[in-house]
Amino acid sequence: MRLRARPGSDLPVDDALGVALADMVRRTGAAIGGLYLVEEPAALLRLVALCGLPVDFTAPWQRLPLTAPVPVADAIAADQLVWIGCQDEMARRYPRAAAVLPYPFALAAAPVRGVRRRWGGVVLMWPADHPSRATTRERHHITASARRLARLLDDSPVPPALPDRPRVVAVDSLHHPAQTALAAVDYLDRIPDGALALDLEGRITFMSAPAARLLGRDADRLLGTRPWQSLPWLDDLRYEERYRLAVVSRAPVAFSALRPPDHWLTFHLHPDASGISVRITAGAETAAGASGRAEPAPTTPGRLYQLIHLAAALTETVTTRDLVALMADNVLTAFGAQGLVISIAEAGRLRIAGIHGYSAEAAERLDALPLDTGVTPVGQVMASGVPAFFGSPAELTAVYPRAPQVSGKQAWAFLPLIISGRPVGCCVLSYERPHAFTADERAVLTPLAGLLAQALDRARLYDTQHHLVHQLQQALLPRSLPALPGLDVAVRYLPAGHGIDVGGDFYDLLRLDDTCAAAVIGDVEGHSMAAAALMGQVRTAIHAHATAGATPDQVIARTNRLLADLTPDLLVTCLYVHLDLARQELTLAGAGHVPPLLRPAPGRAHPLYLDPGPPLGVDACARYPVTRGALPAGAVLALYTDGLVERPGTDVDRATADLAEHLAHADADDLERLIDSLVHQAWPAGGHTDDLAVLLLRTGRPGSSSEIR
């Protein structure tokens, strides 16, 4: 029966999604399930519902960028099922994810795509004994269940909520009569082995009398607690890790531990969807399976994995903005904080490099504070290199009376940012309520500050270089395009998503006389200063020859001879279009460039395939044939570089045809929006891997004020 979330239904959409996820877990035989929804316009994935796993396990995964290297993001981007059959495959394909989930399991990620939009994705995990290959029937169940989730979302009159923490959904389980339960307790109390029951959160829900004797603690003192927290001799990272392994893999796990002074116990963990049954046995033979009691771990596994996850994520940040976004999305969530300030020491003052969770007025008060003002602990923290933690305004006021009034927060962690022994700034995590910092929080935040400092240093260097490169790029491209009666123009240059090297894509529009213009677009191979310099030379040469009255083929041929004399190491493609608006004609000459698109009228568009010559600079004697065509009033001509149509795994001709089909039926009234739609058509998930330039030209419509008469 299909769940509905329309008005008058029994379940609101949030509850219906949880029920549908639990049903999907049951139908597919999975042990764990999670539903992600896309958070627009931030381009993030938010985990909104969870089955079969404690919420704390998912801390590193509750909010993810749509471009994150994880299976669910890839499933959404490719709009197809992603299957990971084993832990080795996860390590090969998603090493960062595997570092945070070092357990044996099988995993599937499927997109949840509706009729008009992508809603998100769903993740399922199976125990370690699941076959490494999914059957056809199993894949069908997964994709059908994902479509069912999409229909629920499509049918809902209101969008689902995006909670700060995912909703935990229970998978139905069998309930035994009370008499049977009492008989079971009597049975367990009569056998020498101890029996424990843990829920998926690791809390003790049942304990037999022999278990209490073996553990050396009364049952009423242990029920509701986690063994590694209530029993000091189990406060060991390895023991809690065994529990995590059982929860995620759903496979039996055993380990031995020494209960002081000399009692060895073996714990046998048997997990399922409702919790973990633990059998405790005693005996000297278990000592051979352990090398002795380990020293207490410096932090819990959850915090350790958070640190590993954040360390891996910090290596992928590029700009300071990326870094602040990562900290806001991951660190604040992991530690329950609401505010973040990253400040850099410059000329004796603290300049804010990134801020989140503060009002504009508070940000203005915090920016450019003197280092030695004594208003906040930042100066002392940077001078000593030791973090400072204040759990309440009273604690902070006792040392810095004016500090709470500066930010209005209620608890703070001041973390020094030190690079090669030199303090360069400070990171402040703040809370809107008093917060007691635990030992493991301090233990993780301290090394995290060092990782953040290194990432910030790289990001600032990138930002500086990127700013210089951007200025160079802008200097080489035209600052503005000339106005010509009867011709509407829009242009867009989009650099590649990563890297600081300047690209070689270029464009230009030249006014030749009152009724004629020349449009140029081209691409220099590579991303480097040499590519930028060559691009500037090509633009200058084309401009000089075109304004001197040369025909399109002469412009390209003469520019080619100039580049041949310069003997460049880089290839240059180019397209030159002469537009005669009075005669409604166009003449083209190309040098190895991708074909332009012409939309002569709404509903019709096609590539203008011409007979191009070789790229510029290859053959000094090359000839460049011309192609002529009609340019009716109201026509749209789209010139672009190959970054718009060359995508990994996609045929260029197919991509060009799809782009022409989109252009034919798109709204061409606003050329800027038309460029947006063309770029989205080519790269629906964003993240283009090469520079791209788009130049749109639209001739005056019949009867419009811009029409040439």
Image (cartoon, rainbow, N blue to C red):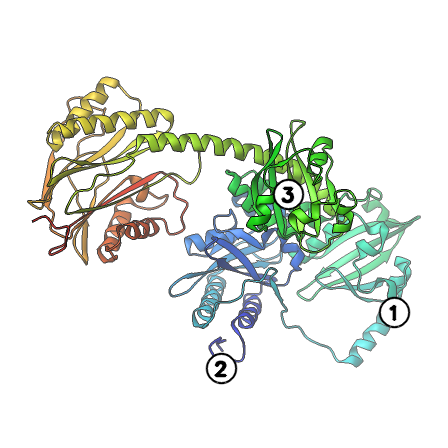
Left or right of 80: which side holds 397?
right
Q: Nearer the viewer, residue 85 or 322?
A: 322
Q: Which residue is mark 3?
A: 308
The amino acid type of the residue labelled 2 equals Gly
- Residue at 30% across, 45% down: 651
Apparent side of residue 610 relative to residue 138 in the rendered image (left or right): left
Other-residue count near label 3 (Cα within 10 Å), few / some / many at <14 / 14–19 / ≥20 = some
Looking at numbered disc 3 in the image, what kind of residue is underneath it?
Ile
| Separation of marks 2 and 3 at Cα, in angstroms | 47 Å
Image coords of residue 674 (percent x, y):
28, 52
Q: Does any portion of residue 148 appear in the rendered image?
A: yes
**Label 1 sits on residue:** 189
Task: Give the residue displayed 54% in from the left and 46% down from the top.
Answer: 325
Q: Position of residue 221 (x, y in %)?
A: 87, 63
Residue 178 is labelled as none
Q: Nearer the viewer, mark 2 or mark 3?
A: 2
Identify the secondary structure beneath mark 1: helix
- First of labels 1, 2 by sequence position: 2
Q: Is residue 386 above or below residue 118?
A: above
Count of marks overlaid on the render: 3
Q: Secondary structure at mark 3?
A: helix
Q: Nearer the viewer, residue 48 or 409?
A: 409
Bin the neighbour count of mark 2 within 10 Å (Cα to Cα): few under 14, some 14-19, many 20 and up.
few
Residue 257 % position (x, y): 83, 50
| Amino acid type, residue under disc 1 in the picture | Asp
**Label 1 CA crowd tier, 10 Å (few <14, some 14–19, many 20+):** some
Considering every residue shown, the one lying at the far right of the view is: 261
Residue 138 placement, left or right of 561 = right
- Looking at the rendered image, the disc whose residue lies closer to the viewer, 1 or 2, is 2
Q: Earlier in the sequence, mark 3 or mark 1?
A: 1
Question: What residue is pinned by disc 2?
Answer: 8
